[in-house]
Amino acid sequence: MITRRQMTAAAAVIAAGGTVQPAQSAEPASQRFTFLLVHGAWHGGWCWKYVRDYLEDRGHRVFTPSLTGHGDRVHLRSPQVNLDTHIMDVINLINWEELDDVVLVGHSYAGFIVTGVCDRLKDRVGHVVYLDSFVPKDGDTVLPEPTKEFAESRYGPLEDDYLAYAREPVSFGIPESMPEELRWLRRRLTPQQLGTWIQPISLNNGGSDGVPRTFIYCNDKPPLTDQQATRLKNFQDDPTWRYMELPCGHDSMVILPEATAQMLEEIAATV
């Protein structure tokens, strides 16, 4: 696989208030931060490999856990795994590693997870980043209709009545011009456990309200629905949010890992 130092990170990053130009090399950063990167559905901690490498080369501390039932923890998948399980995966990591002032990043489905973590550990999170992700309210579920039948209508029959298989990696925005990356995902994507999609999130402390937060939109996608466009405009207009964009499809950590890492570093440095 080609190194990410040589690939598309040379592209400009569209950002609020200006453009982030990619660095020539991963020289040590003047400030050091702690990043906790949480993967989305079907993925695992492995998907952050090149983002993690770049940030660690810059001297930052980086954690990329695989949620229960995914990646290197696929042997723990079970019908009993639900959204609370995944939220506790991240809470326990923060507690056991005694982390503070964390830059907490949730991609896609993990918007639910980082919101739940903020709700319970608000004083331990320095900034929360929603990377092309859900931003749930109290009582929301990942699926708009939280049933097995609805999941099967979208993803086909569930294995053992609880495992939803991923679509082809191109559905995550990875172009056909990146065949090695497509093969990489095909080898590693794992089924999503239904319980994580149908359990309502419980937010007793306002979720991420009050925490510095940024929404990053991956903008190389089909045209938005009116509802999606309104949602993004709300982020742009809300002074409690910082809004930024990346010029790629959904899996920016695979498509533009260096640019993604640089944007996360910029966010951390401007808190």
Image: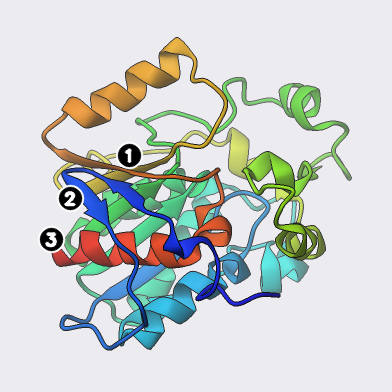
Residue matched to label 3: 270
| x, y percent for residue 79 | 74, 49
Q: Quadrant of the N terminus?
A: bottom right
In 3D space, how far apart are the residues under numbered discs 3 and 2 (Cα atoms)?
14 Å
Sequence order check, earlier mark of 2 and 1? 1
Crowding at dot 1, Cα within 10 Å, few <14 / some 14-19 / many 20+, comes out as: some
Going by the image, does 164 lie left or right of 225? right
Going by the image, does 14 lie left or right of 147? left
| x, y percent for residue 91 | 39, 65
Give me the residue at 71% from left, 62% from top: 181
Q: Where 61 sits versus 134, above or below? A: below
Tag shown at residue 203: 1
Nearer the camera: disc 2 or disc 1: 2
Which element is circle 2 on?
A: loop
Look at the image and tell me whether residue 90 can be seen. Answer: no
Which element is circle 3 on?
A: loop
Tag shown at residue 180: none
Give me the residue at 39% from left, 84% from top: 56
